[in-house]
Image: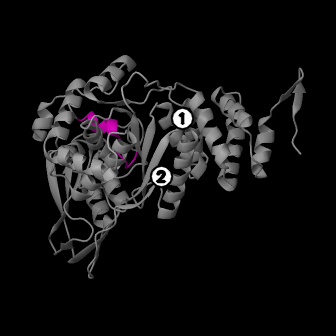
């Protein structure tokens, strides 16, 4: 059925045979997947052959064994971070991305406040989703590049450090994603799951908590697809000997109220001070509770939840955030007085043109509005304006009258009409009463 070339007494693999196998839905071996990923990373396998293989995966899926083998093969192409010098169980958190998702800014210091080491590597934003590093860099002087020795020392001393991902973390994933992006093979559960988990495993964590979002403002549009992705990642984590928990959370409206880098830092500070939006606080507490239990700093999530909630309201979590910012060169005065953070010259209220109940806020449209103002990148080369963005004034379920403010635009340009149009499109108003949406739909362990 499959052709192989014999050379010097060894059976030599050929990419065309692996494409044929996957096209006919025959399971590949661990050795075949390792050979393929190494060959592509080393530029021995051309793009056109890997593209054919990826399309076969899109149509025929991968088995659990293949998904694990693909993840581990991508991990092995680069550096695997050794966090063994950090005391305690290291728990990482990953979000599949959304609009207004500033959870890492709150989650990190909150979890660190109860003694759980947070050694986190984060990324930048592209498009309508914001990156943790970009948000942190809105704080003057904040360094997001540390030498590994300094990184480990800071986690041991302060219990928290957040830095940019090393360029040598699962490099195969970077090459494969670039190819998937231009061959319409991004939307594949095994490819997405192995991409995310390869970087998480390479980053050295002992346990992983995943926030898998679904809805208009997320990559996964339906609950069913998000659940399939979450299960796939939990299975890969388990088989790779990492305790893994996945949350399924709603992203049909933005998380919290603020969308934009410095604006989200301000909202994170409010939340760490015990005055944040209820949806944001609840999600952070739930994610953090599971991280604390996985780190064996609490016996149950209920016990962890109570301690963490106290730390959000008694100043301990905020103090930990200040320590973290100061340790990485940031200006702590901006945390003590958020008005010192970058801000926009112009604030414009977007008014409701009809009365009723907020039925829906399309998170994608809000994210695009913020990007149009300069809060996000359309391309990797774009420069972000740290002070601009959108702050919602009304969320789903609330009642509005004609002329009530739906949201505020923060702009440094007089050309903001397009952003207003996107916000007006995002808000859907019903004459019938609407319930507030469910935030957390399921937890997969």
Residue pointed to by mark 1:
174
Foreground residue among 347 and 72: 72
Secondary structure type for disc 2: loop
Q: Residues within 10 Å of mark 2 (few under 14, many from 20)?
A: some
What residue is at 59 percent from the left and 34 percent from the top?
74
Depth check, front residue: 309 or 303: 303
Q: Is residue 424 above or below residue 189?
A: below
Residue 431: % across, % down: 26, 82
Can residue 394 be seen in this snapshot?
yes
Magenta region includes residue 434: no
Span of residues in magenta = 127-138
Tell me residue 98's x, y (percent).
37, 52
In this rendered view, identify the residue nearer to me: 317 or 370. Answer: 317
136 magenta-colored:
yes
Tell me: residue 424, above or below residue 31. Answer: below
* Image side of residue 58 versus residue 416, left or right: right
Residue 100 visible in the picture: no
Residue drawn at 31 percent across, 61 percent down: 422
Residue at the image position 36 percent from the left and 26 percent from the top? 87
Label whose residue precedes the other's in the sequence (2 or 1): 1
Q: Residue at x 57, y 52 (%)?
A: 189
Could you say which quadrant of the image residue 442 lies in?
A: bottom left
| Vertical placement of residue 288 versus 359, above or below | above
């Amino acid at each position: 059925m499959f052709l192989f070339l014999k050379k010097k007494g060894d059976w030599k693999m050929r990419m065309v045979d692996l494409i044929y196998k996957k096209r006919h839905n025959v399971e590949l071996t661990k050795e075949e997947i390792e050979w393929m990923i190494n060959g592509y990373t080393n530029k021995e396998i051309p793009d056109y052959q890997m593209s054919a293989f990826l399309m076969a995966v899109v149509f025929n899926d991968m088995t659990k064994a293949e998904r694990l083998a693909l993840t581990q093969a991508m991990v092995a192409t680069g550096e695997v971070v050794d966090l063994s010098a950090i005391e305690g169980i290291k728990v990482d958190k990953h979000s599949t991305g959304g609009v207004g998702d500033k959870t890492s800014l709150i989650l990190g210091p909150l979890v660190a406040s109860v003694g759980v080491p947070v050694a986190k590597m984060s990324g930048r934003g592209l498009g309508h989703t914001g990156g943790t590093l970009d948000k942190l860099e809105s704080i003057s002087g904040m360094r997001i590049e540390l030498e590994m020795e300094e990184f480990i020392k800071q986690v041991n001393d302060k219990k928290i450090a957040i830095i940019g991902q090393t360029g040598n973390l699962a490099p195969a994933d970077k090459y494969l994603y670039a190819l998937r992006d231009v061959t319409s093979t991004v939307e594949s559960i095994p490819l997405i799951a192995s991409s995310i988990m390869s970087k998480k495993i390479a980053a050295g964590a002992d346990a992983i908590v995943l926030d898998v979002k679904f809805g208009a403002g997320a990559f996964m549009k339906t609950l069913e697809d998000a659940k399939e992705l979450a299960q796939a990642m939990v299975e890969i984590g388990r088989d790779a000997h990492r305790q893994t928990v996945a949350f399924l959370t709603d992203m049909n409206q933005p998380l919290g109220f603020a969308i934009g880098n410095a604006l989200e830092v301000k909202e994170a500070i409010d939340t760490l001070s015990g005055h944040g939006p209820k949806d944001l606080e609840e999600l952070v507490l739930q994610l953090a509770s599971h991280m604390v239990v996985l780190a064996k700093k609490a016996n149950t999530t209920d016990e962890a939840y109570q301690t963490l909630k106290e730390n959000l309201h008694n100043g301990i979590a905020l103090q930990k955030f200040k320590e973290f910012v100061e340790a990485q060169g940031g200006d702590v005065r901006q945390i003590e007085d958020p008005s010192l953070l970058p801000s926009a010259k112009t604030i414009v209220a977007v008014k409701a043109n009809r009365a009723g109940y907020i039925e829906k806020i399309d998170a994608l449209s809000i994210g695009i509005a913020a990007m149009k103002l300069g809060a996000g990148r359309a391309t990797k080369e774009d420069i972000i304006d740290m002070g601009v963005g959108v702050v919602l004034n009304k969320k789903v379920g609330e009642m509005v009258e004609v002329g009530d403010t739906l949201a505020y635009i923060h702009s440094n340009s007089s050309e903001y009409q397009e952003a207003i149009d996107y916000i007006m499109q995002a808000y859907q108003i019903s004459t019938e009463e609407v319930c507030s949406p469910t935030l957390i739909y399921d937890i997969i362990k």
